[in-house]
Amino acid sequence: MTNNMATTTIEMAPDGADHISPPADADLATMLLIRHFELALLDLFARGELHGTTHTCLGQEYVPVALVPLLAERDYVFSNHRGHGHYIARFGDPAGLLAEIMGREGAVCNGVGGSQHIFRDRYLSTGVQGESLPVAAGVALHLKRHEPGALALTYIGDGTWGEGAVYEALNMAALWRLPLLVVVEHNGIAQSTATGAQMAGTIRARAAAFGIAHLRVENSSLTEIRATAGPLVERVRDGAPLVLEFVTHRLGPHSKGDDTRTDAELRQVRAADWHALYSEALGERFAEADAIAAARVTRLVDEVAARPPAVWSKA
Amino acid sequence: MAAPTMDRPTSAAPAPVQTLTIAKALNNGLRASMEANRKVLVMGEDVGKLGGVFRITDGLQKDFGEQRVLDTPLSESGIIGTAVGLAIRGYRPVCEIQFDGFIFPGFDQIVSQVAKLHYRTQGRLKLPMVIRVPFGGGIGAVEHHSESPESYFAHTAGLRVVTCSNPADAYWMIQQAIDCDDPVLFFEPKRRYYEKGEVDTTAAPGPLFRSRTLRTGRDVTVVTYGPMVRTSLDAAAAAEEEGRSLEVIDLRTLSPLDLAPVYESVRRTGRLVVVTEAPGESSISSEIAAKVQQECFYSLQAPVLRVTGFDTPYPPSKLEEEFLPDLDRVLHAVDRSLAW
């Protein structure tokens, strides 16, 4: 099996309020739902209603929403420790996820998996960095043989590129021409360590080393992302793996209260937040949708918190 | 037997009882599983054209094709992780880890994914996969080709760990492990690969997760597994010449442990020696000692004694005979137990 794929690298325009194309109502609603879901989790922790830990995707909500129409039900999605947005974008089921995190009736995995270990249909998440890449490669190998046209997507962060498993899987994916889509949420910070302090070189060059196509997206406008990424995702289905790198921003702490960034750094991050850009671009329409999402999550939290505990069962 | 002709293949009627090496028995067992179930895949480093460093997969790629016998990159995490993905989708992958010391790059996948997915999903995901590991020393090789890492895996909830000690078990246990819906770590005593024994291909000697008493005796119970089974049986034969009767139990399964026959035996003999090649510290041998003292406290005539590898890294090959437990060390422990 030889690898003669041409490396593709495409860069999209940097962000800016001018570049936000008006999103569909449903997409805007999902992005805002994820935003308020994450804010509610931090609030529940602060009030002592949640235990353990969580990692919110505040600032990154648009990434999985942008990918929704590019994916099919038969595609596999592997998520990571920061995966609430991935789940909600795929299933539109914030109640099942919140119940899972709170250990209440109706939990997706009966409360066993919690925030980071979710299994539902063709969706599986794990909290250890990079671990899902080889698993996704294995699923992609099965899909290639038995369900051609389907793909396996795995979400990772910029910090994940420090893990060796990433390279083992990329090598196999390129070698065996697997339908593997690696979505990188490059938020510039690995827990508390800036990318520049933990990554030598670039993600683009690392993908190129395997002959794997790479697309870097610096935009949070759904229409533009889909138009550019769509054709490359279709090539993944034919066995051309792709590294799809979103330059994004992590608004909140890595987990809870462990943010070491300066006020100036945080101001910069907030200024680039899609929420602010969309608000400015969409005005009143955005404010209304935001209020609706906030109210929906408030009701959701009350409703799920009132449920009885989840019961563990045996399959 | 008539000479084979073009239209009468020799495979039509294999003899029901054959004399095979452990290596050949494993090869035949893998072949039988692959013939019985198209979902069975073999994957690993150099398992295809070469047939594996120890030739355990010899000829399988030629007969079953590259789709079912995959030569992988040198990527243990990738091999095991990919097998997890394949198992999720209904395959029954059999991964070969070339040498014991090479399993550590795959440890993350084994401990965090293979062992836990069934639990996390409350049984909705099953991982019917086998990880084959040639283990132990005695072949004049280097440290990372001679290790006994089985206790790490027995320590991890969610994994099943077995080891064969003879050709009949090798032939049947590998097939039973492949049939098992849970992930199985399958440890093969590499220095015994070329020892021969009879294999009845018509009937399995017993279920997979059961220990077996190989020799009955009155004076001291010896519990062991893998490469030390041969050593312990030799020790029992030597002891008999001195009028001492040893009972030898082959554990076969390290997780779950099947200790009921051990308890029954110790209640009769009152004495137990545990023999392993692996170092003793926080190990399967210490687990057995703890459980036996708990279950058989009033029957014990002597403390449970252990004969194990030393608590050091595996030594250079010129020193390995000093490291490996041998017949003399087993007999010395038997003497100490009887003299207590």
Image: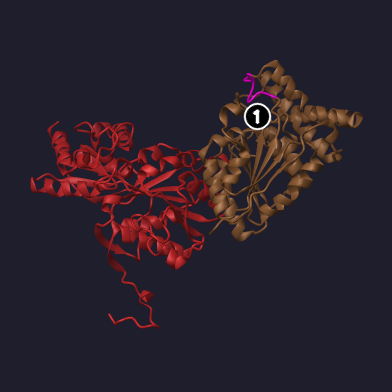
Q: Picture coordinates of residue B67 (x, y %)?
A: 51, 62
Front residue of B28/B320: it is B320
Range shown magenta: A252-260
Quarter of the image where one finds residue B288? top left
Could you tell whether A248 is left or right of B40 in the image?
A: right
Front residue of B266/A202: it is A202
- Residue type indicated by callout 1: Gly
| The colour assigned to chain B within the rendered structure | red
Q: Picture coordinates of residue A217 (x, y %)?
A: 72, 39
Is residue A286 visible in the rendered image? The answer is no
Give the chain letter for brown. A
Q: Is A256 colored magenta in this rendering?
A: yes
- In the rendered view, tell whether residue B110 sits above or below residue A115: below
- In the rendered view, tell whether residue B222 sits above or below residue B177: above
Q: Residue at x 35, y 56 (%)?
A: B206
Question: Which residue does the numbered mark 1 point to in the structure image?
Answer: A188
